[in-house]
Structure formats: structure tokens, C-alpha cells
Image (cartoon, helix red, strand yellow):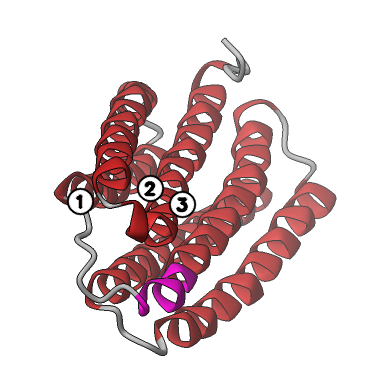
Amino acid sequence: MIARKSLEQSLEMIEDSISGQCDQIEAMIRSAYRGLCERCMGTADNVLAMEERINENEVQIEEHCLAVLALHQPVASDLRRTAAALKINADLERIADLALNLAERTESLVEFPHLEIPSRLTDMVLFSINMLRDAREAFLKVDKGLAMKVRGDDCKLDEMNRQVILELTEKMTAHPEWVSGYLHVFSASRIVERIGDHATNIAEDIEYVVDGEIHRHQ
């Protein structure tokens, strides 16, 4: 009974830490995109400082997961929770890397102060943040239905990305002198689309916790 309580406390601590990572990563994405739109020099440095904290937390969470595996030797759903936490932890660290990449686009766009950021890209950023929020909520509540919603939303984000690319292609045709600037926006759109991919990975791991089936590549 005592061992069971200790295991549950350890898993809850890991899940709380992962939830905290999600909050910090959302702040990184928002800061990066705001800097991109406003052409704020120094955005990348600010986001880098946040990303370094994410990296430190990622190592600590992984160490806690490995300690659970070694000390408690969990089985069944507890083992799946621990394995999923390890994988989700890694996906969150990659999302933080992408947020930093997004911030770095700011430096490149400073040379194009009058270049308009497509409103659809703003929609994509907000949509990807909602995907991340839903993935966290699904993880904390072990909610397979919400996880499946996140997987479905990835298709919607992909379509939004295609629309942004189409719009950028049209703008580059109309303003060939700004092609290099629009390519940076193109890169930003692709980065946001990849954030959605990692949120989808998290959703797939939650489905694994629920039913024990691996849903990747299906």
C-alpha cells in the first residue's frame, strides 16, 4: 500500500512537471511570434533563455522517470504512463527548439519592415497553441477522446499551412524583390506546422496509455 502511494506520488510529480513545461513552451511560442510580427530585435535571445530552462527541466523529468522505472518497476498502465511521460517530455523539448527557431526568423525579417505577415499564419499559431493545450489536458486527465481530437486537428493545421504557402507563393510572384523575405515567413509557417506534429505525437502517446496500442503511422 505504501509502495503504491509512493509510485502514484512520483507519477503525479512527473505529470505536474510536464504540465509546467507546457505552460512555459506556450509562453515561448507567443513571445517568438509576437517578436516576428513586431520585428523585435532581441526576441531570439529572450526565447533562448527560456529554452535553456526547458532543457534543464527536460533532463530532470527524464531522471525522475528513470528513477520510477528503477525503484518501482511499474507494470501495466503505470508502466505506460511512465513510458508516455518520457516520450512526451522529449516532444516538448523539441517544440521548445521550434519556438526558438521561430524567434530566430525575427532577425531575418528585420530587413523587411513593411512585409506583411499573413493573418492565416496568426491563426496557425493560435491553433497550434490550442492543440498543445488540449494535448496537455488529455495527458493530465487521460482523456482519449480529447487526444483523438488533437490528432484530427493536425489535419486542419496542415490545411492552414497549405493555404499560407499558396498565399505566399502569390505574393512572391507579385513582388519578386521581396522573395527572400517571404521565404522566411514560409519557414515560419513550416515551423508552426511542425509544432502541431509534435502535439499530435503527444496525443498518440496518450492513446497508448489508455488502450496499450501504438498509434503512430496508422
Provide the secondary structure element on which disc 3 rests: helix
Mark seen at residue 187:
3
Mark seen at residue 161:
none
Report the Cα–Cα distance between label 3 and label 2. Answer: 5 Å
Q: Residue at x 67, y 25 (%)?
A: 76
Q: Which amino acid type is shown beneath numbered disc 1?
A: Pro
Q: Relative to residue 99, is residue 144 depicted above or below? A: above
Give neighbour class at mark 3: few <14, some 14-19, many 20+ (Cα, 10 Å): some
Provide the secondary structure element on which disc 2 rests: helix
Residue 160, x across and y down, in percent: 27, 33
Provide the secondary structure element on which disc 1 rests: loop
Judge whether residue 23 can be spotted in this image.
yes
Report which residue position mark 2 lands on: 189
Q: Earlier in the sequence, mark 3 or mark 1?
A: 1
Q: Earlier in the sequence, mark 1 or mark 2?
A: 1
Give neighbour class at mark 2: few <14, some 14-19, many 20+ (Cα, 10 Å): many
Q: Would you say the residues marked 1 and 2 are in contact, meaning their CB atoms lie under 8 Å apart? A: yes
Report which residue position mark 1 lands on: 118
Residue 187, x across and y down, in percent: 46, 52
The quarter in which the C terminus is drawn is: top right
Q: Which amino acid type is shown beneath numbered disc 3?
A: Ser
Residue 93, x across and y down, in percent: 59, 59
* Horizontal side, residue 197 vs residue 148: left or right: right
Residue range corresponding to the magenta coloring:
104-111
Toward the viewer: 53 or 136?
Answer: 53
Residue 60, x across and y down, in percent: 68, 70
Q: Which amino acid type is shown beneath numbered disc 2?
A: Ser
* Horizontal side, residue 9 vs residue 123: left or right: right
Q: Residue at x 35, y 39 (%)?
A: 141
